Image (cartoon, rainbow, N blue to C red):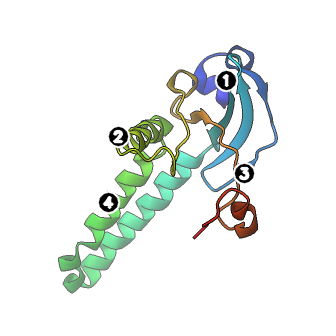
Amino acid sequence: IVEADLGKPLSEVYSKFDETPLASASVAQVHAARLVSGEDVVVKVQKPGVKDTLAADLGFLEVAAKALEFIAPDLSRLSVAAIVQDLRTSMLGELDFRAEGKCLDEFREFIRANGLEEVATAPAYYPAQSAGKVLTMERLYGVPLVDLEGIKEFSSNPE
């Protein structure tokens, strides 16, 4: 998937790519990697067939909403079908990881513009090493938000 989406062999982009994912969810999985330039990164890779499955599921939901409005006309004033259609458009749009990368850049700029670098961060986006189904971003090392004891090692006031 990565080579096909980037249009080049892994070895031209990454000097190291861990085939075992760090994490996995319904839409994608995340792999640890190192760019050929030396930066540690994580690579979010969309799972095969996700777009088709999601499009079919959301299409069914849209048809069901329209049928429900037909059967119960009072529901049409709630615009259930329109809401489902907007949700479908939005969710399918989020499957293009380049849009997520642009959001990362915007968020990083927001942090910088507001002087929040000491209290917040977001991973850097690597657009040249990303594509529609592959998102390469800076690997951040830290402590999970649910690990209060671990956070206390870095902050005197974790709350």
Give the answer, above or below, for where 50 lies relative to 144: above
Circle 1 residues within 10 Å: few <14, some 14–19, many ≥20: few
What x and y, as percent, mark residue 18? Answer: 80, 34
Q: Earlier in the sequence, mark 1 or mark 3?
A: 1
Q: Residue 113 carries which label?
A: 2
Q: Look at discs 2 and 1 and give the one toward the viewer.
A: 2
Q: Earlier in the sequence, mark 2 or mark 1?
A: 1
- Mark 3 residue type: Ala
Q: Is 38 displayed left or right of 49 in the figure?
A: right
What x and y, as percent, mark residue 140? Answer: 65, 42
| Quarter the C terminus occupies | bottom right
- The residue tagged 3 is 23
Q: Distance between the residues labelled 2 and 1?
A: 36 Å
Whether residues under marks 4 and 1 lie with C-beta atoms below 8 angstroms apart, the answer is: no
Which residue shows up at 20% across the image and 85% down it? 74
- The residue tagged 4 is 85
Give the answer, above or below, for where 123 lies relative to 25: above
Give the answer, above or below, for where 40 lies relative to 107: above
- The residue tagged 1 is 3
